[in-house]
Image (tube, helix red, strand yellow):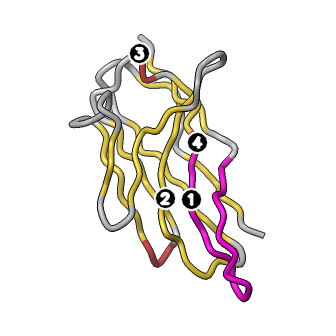
Amino acid sequence: QVQLVESGGGLVQPGGSLRLSCAASGSIDSIYAMGWYRQVPGKQRELVATITSSTNYANSVKGRFTISRDNAKNTVYLRMNSLKPEDTDVYYCNADIATRYTRVRNIYWGQGTQVTVSS
């Protein structure tokens, strides 16, 4: 079984920064992609950033957020700078993973971590 564990969410002032982390564990053979999504009640879950051999960002976070990964630790990070109140959301970790032995490929989700930007 594959598990994604997120950390780093919290309350910050506008203009502040946070660093989110997500570590994947379990019967992992290969991780093809990792990323971050966000969602508030009543809204569609939206892509924030993904990383494969390259990075991809939502237009709303370009220039402010940076996604990176540590392959040895099966961990993806999201550095969020210049945070705005509209960045307030639950942020979800996502990973495209093939499991060990069977090499079955699927998408896995973390439980989410709350980010609140407020003065």
Front: mark 3 or 1: 1
Circles 1 and 2, Cβ within 8 Å, touching? The answer is: yes
Q: Which mark is residue 34?
A: 2
Q: Amino acid at mark 3?
A: Pro
Farthest residue toward the top? 119
Query: In the image, what residue type sits under mark 2?
Result: Met
Real-space Cα distance between discs 4 and 3? 18 Å
* Residue 114 pos. (x, y %): 59, 31
Residue 77: % across, % down: 43, 54
Q: Secondary structure at mark 4?
A: strand
How many neighbours does mark 1 have within 10 angstroms: few (below 14), some (14-19), or many (20 or more)? many
Q: Nearer the viewer, mark 4 or mark 3?
A: 4
Q: Residue shown at 66%/64% (left/top)? A: 106
Q: Earlier in the sequence, mark 3 or mark 2?
A: 2
Image check: 15 left or right of 23?
A: left
The residue under label 3 is 85
Q: Earlier in the sequence, mark 4 or mark 2?
A: 2
Q: What amino acid is at disc 4?
A: Tyr
Evaluate if marks 3 and 1 touch, with contact meaning CB atoms under 8 Å apart.
no
Q: Position of residue 14 (x, y in %)?
A: 34, 18
Mark with earlier residue (1, 2): 2
Secondary structure found at label 2: strand
Magenta-tinted stretch? 92-110
**Within 10 angstroms of label 2, few (less than 14), some, or many (20 or more) residues?**
many
Q: How many marks?
A: 4
Quadrant placement of the N terminus? bottom right
Q: Nearer the viewer, mark 4 or mark 1?
A: 1
Q: Nearer the viewer, residue 95 or 26?
A: 95
Circle 4 residue: 92
Residue at the outermost bottom position: 101
Q: Which residue is mark 1?
A: 95
